[in-house]
Image (cartoon, coloured by chain):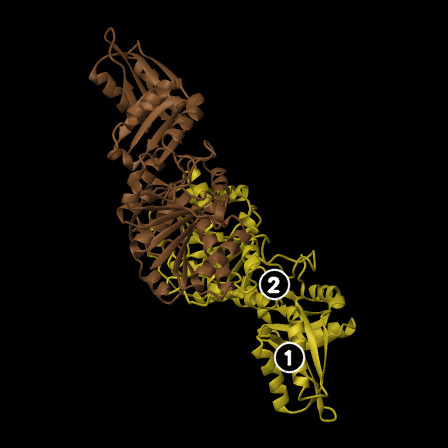
Chain colours: A brown, B yellow
Amino acid sequence: MTTVLKFGGTSVATIDQIKNIAQNINDRHCQGEQLLIVVSAMGKSTDRLLKMIHEISTTPSKRELDMLLATGEQVTIPLLSTALKELGCNAISLTGAQAGIQTTDHHAKARIESIASELILKHLEAGTIVVVAGFQGISATGDITTLGRGGSDTTAVALAASLKAKCEIYTDVDGIYTIDPRYNSKARKLHTISYVEMLEMASLGANVLETRAIEMAHKFKVPLYVGKSHTTLPGTHIIERNNTMESTVITGVSIDNNCLMASVKHLPFSQTNIANLFMNLASKNLNVDMISIAAPYNGHVTVSFTAEKNDVIEIQEVISNMKKELETIEITTNDQIVKLSVVGIGMVSHSGVAANIFRLFAEENINYYQVTTSEISISYTILESDVQRSIEIISKAYELEQ
Amino acid sequence: MTTVLKFGGTSVATIDQIKNIAQNINDRHCQGEQLLIVVSAMGKSTDRLLKMIHEISTTPSKRELDMLLATGEQVTIPLLSTALKELGCNAISLTGAQAGIQTTDHHAKARIESIASELILKHLEAGTIVVVAGFQGISATGDITTLGRGGSDTTAVALAASLKAKCEIYTDVDGIYTIDPRYNSKARKLHTISYVEMLEMASLGANVLETRAIEMAHKFKVPLYVGKSHTTLPGTHIIERNNTMESTVITGVSIDNNCLMASVKHLPFSQTNIANLFMNLASKNLNVDMISIAAPYNGHVTVSFTAEKNDVIEIQEVISNMKKELETIEITTNDQIVKLSVVGIGMVSHSGVAANIFRLFAEENINYYQVTTSEISISYTILESDVQRSIEIISKAYELEQ
């Protein structure tokens, strides 16, 4: 069975790091493993390229941007391949196009459509280590495309799916924790987590893996592993749901501190006005997350929603425009809030988690403004100042610490 | 008629230079010219890439080296294309592979086999400025290749040949001079020079254009122009031989100061020994240029030849090895010599140039060690200390100054 190893930009930031990774790959190759390596651009090289083109244009064509950014990974692959050859391995570098990664033509956020893996298979079967440039592909018209955020993870998982391989992602964190260790230094590292939990945690703010890559791993049942490069620390396996996991109710807590809460007050109550509010926001590509609508009072209603912190000015503009017709409305925004989510596949069979957390919050006088639930998660917007205390009580109640 | 413009690395070393070149291209495009641009890697970027890979291996695989170096030009093309779009032009960047530049698989020194120019033609006919990465192509197996030294000039001329276009090469010198202005500040800039003279001057040490590009321009009758980027100074046209040129006997003087003279003394005289000497040198890829063999004396002979300065140690090794069987031989090397060549298509019809220069050298007591002649050039090895004086007398005798 082939293993796909993916190394992110911080893992290959220097020549010494590239040599170090080559040594590890060589050790495994010598033990008979068939290896395909996916790498990102070195450290800050993407930033350097962006800085150059932004000196020319603030809105460069996305096709030209892809042409430029794709060079970042194309620098890493021959360097790693050369480092492997120096150790006596057979190794070959392939660009995304050469690796047969066919994508849509949506530059800067292309999606992989198919992988023509004949060339990769030929090299792997000959005992050659194949080093593929992550993040990039080629469109049907022969243009170089990039996959957007988290693209290299997606490349690795897609290649693993097409080769029926397992996939190991090496990054600068040593695995998936019950809680981001920046919030709770006693957070427990998970030995395993299911795809759906990982997906939920990633989409709720955990930044270790991109949701696209997890979705693809889930869809194609690619065994995934996340670990820290340049160490031997054990990481986390992301696998299909199984019995061992059902013993815990909550697997982890995610914190999203990139949100703000907006409240639109004195909105004349009608389904049309509420629908228009969200349609106007959507027409400006403003993502709205949690929504709560208070009971109407005197024919008026308050609609609250969370959105991304960066969007505050555009949200205010949308409301200003609506004020021309709906003179009574007012907007307040609060960026001192955080979205805290508890995630656990065990919730499906263990009812009462939400009720129990409501009780814990009540005992500790922690206010929450909005609550949403999915099958395996519950999210609360709470004040930033209450985050640490909330994490502590949930960690203790659900044994999330070491 | 399409014009191919080629800008070298020193012309696109900074973002400001790229913007400046875009402005010039835009001005010409607005006047209705159909333009294809070939660019090199920015300034020192190739050196930076080489430094990185040499930290990993002193002898990297040439395939991996090509993969790495090709990124240099791939960075320049979207930057220039974006700068052109900012000015309101339609522009598109193409890698060597996308531009249809098919090469042999001799990595690091591939030769262009054919150009599939359909895509370029489609864009040019739509009024789009096409910006192509110089120096690179793709082999029949889909590997990225580079063309070696002077490769971007060759790309430009090859594209011009395939499009039946003219070709303008912009570099950091403002044209072809009768003598390198570093040797004679009064050297005259040539308005025109013939392909064969340019080829002879380039192969004899003038560094403005690579011989490959000139050969190709000659073969396909591509009108060539060499000028200085970022200026409006008039440059030099390189064209087919014509009547106007025949009025001058000598067009220019080339100096090659990268040579040394080696003398192998006390070689037992036999055709076999002399042949073996040059075969042994050739087997180590040591280029030998001018050869002179003194008359045998006492059954021994002295063989002198010029070679590249860098090869001195390898040449001495070859002779050391031969000493095992031919104990009498000794080698001396002199790197204080220079090869001075006078070039002119007029020599074909004006006899006596060599004789006249022999006379001038005799009058001025300038020693020459070897002389070779071609149909349109005569080369002398002289002492470095005699170069300035030689240039002065030849310049005066043949009106090479302003």
To which quarter of the image does residue B4 belong?
bottom left
Name the element at disc 2.
loop
The residue at the point 65 percent across, 76 percent down is: B315
> Residue B295, relative to residue A219: is it above or below?
below
Which amino acid type is marked by label 1? Answer: Val
Q: Residue furthest bottom?
A: B299
To which quarter of the image does residue B105 belong?
bottom left
User: Which chain does the residue under circle 1 lie in?
Assistant: B
- State how far apart marks 2 and 1 are (Cα): 30 Å
Q: Position of residue A77 (x, y in %)?
A: 45, 55
Q: Which mark is residue B318?
A: 1
Q: Which mark is residue A313?
A: none
Q: Residue furthest top?
A: A298
Q: In this rendering, which labeled residue sits more in front, label 2 or label 1?
A: 1
Can the viewer see residue A123 in this picture? yes
User: Which chain does the residue under circle 2 lie in?
Assistant: B
Q: Position of residue B191 (x, y in %)?
A: 57, 57
> Residue A45, relative to residue B277: is it above or below?
above
- Which of these two is toward me, A310 or A349? A349
Mark positioned earlier in the residue sequence (2 or 1): 2
The residue at the point 70 percent across, 67 percent down is: B394
Give the quadrant of the C terminus of chain B.
bottom right
> Residue B391, relative to residue A43: is it above or below?
below
Q: What is the crowding at mark 2: few (fewer than 14 residues within 10 Å), some, or many (at least 20)? A: many
Q: Position of residue A239 (x, y in %)?
A: 31, 46
Which amino acid type is marked by label 2? Answer: Ala
To which quarter of the image does residue A356 belong?
top left
- From the image, tell me which residue sits under label 2: B206
Q: Position of residue A249 (x, y in %)?
A: 31, 34
- Which of these two is toward me, B266 or A184? A184
